[in-house]
Amino acid sequence: MRALTLLMVLLLAGCSATPVVAYRPVPVWLIPPAPELPKIPSADLACLSDDTYFALAKRDREQDAYARQLRTLLEAR
């Protein structure tokens, strides 16, 4: 009987109300500035095939878009 009571107490403790999570915007001074990326001259990219160049350009565009989305979320009020 004692074990059953202990089991019931443990089960009820596990079913307690979950805490409310409140999300707040990050203060502007905590958001790091965007890094200044180095420029790559076109002569340095001339040795790449067209497929590799377009893949590199696509990767850079997607990474930039992702960073902009994250910054927008951080700056949302």
Image (cartoon, grey):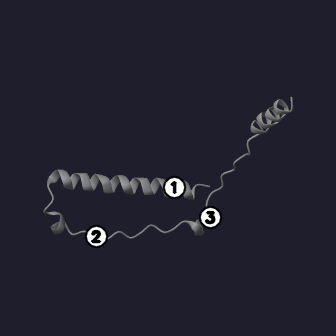
**Label whose residue precedes the other's in the sequence (3 or 2):** 3
Q: Earlier in the sequence, mark 2 or mark 1?
A: 2
The N terminus lies in quadrant: top right
Q: Name the residue under label 2.
A: 39
Rate crowding at label 2 as few (under 14), some (14 to 19) or many (20 or more) other CA atoms within 10 Å. few
Q: Residue 38 at x, y = what percent? A: 31, 71
Query: How far apart are labels 2 and 1 at the CA level?
Result: 25 Å
Q: Quadrant of the C terminus?
A: bottom right
**Residue on which the image places disc 3:** 27
25 displayed left or right of 11: left
Direction from residue 16 to residue 35 in the image, left or right:
left
Badge 2 element: loop
Q: Which amino acid, by three-letter code, is at mark 1? A: Thr
Image height check: is 71 above or below 7? below
Q: Which mark is residue 72?
A: 1
| Marks 3/2: CA–CA distance | 31 Å
- Numbered tag placed on residue 51 in the rendering: none
Q: Does residue 38 lie above or below 61 as drawn? A: below
Q: Position of residue 36 (x, y in %)?
A: 38, 70
Q: Residue at x 82, y 35 (%)?
A: 6
Looking at marks 3 and 1 on the same chain, the residue that comes earlier in the sequence is marked by 3
Query: SS at mark 3?
Result: loop
Residue 15 image point, x, y percent:
75, 35
Of residues 2 and 28, the one nearer the viewer is 2
Secondary structure of the residue carrying tag 1 is helix
Kind of residue at disc 2: Lys
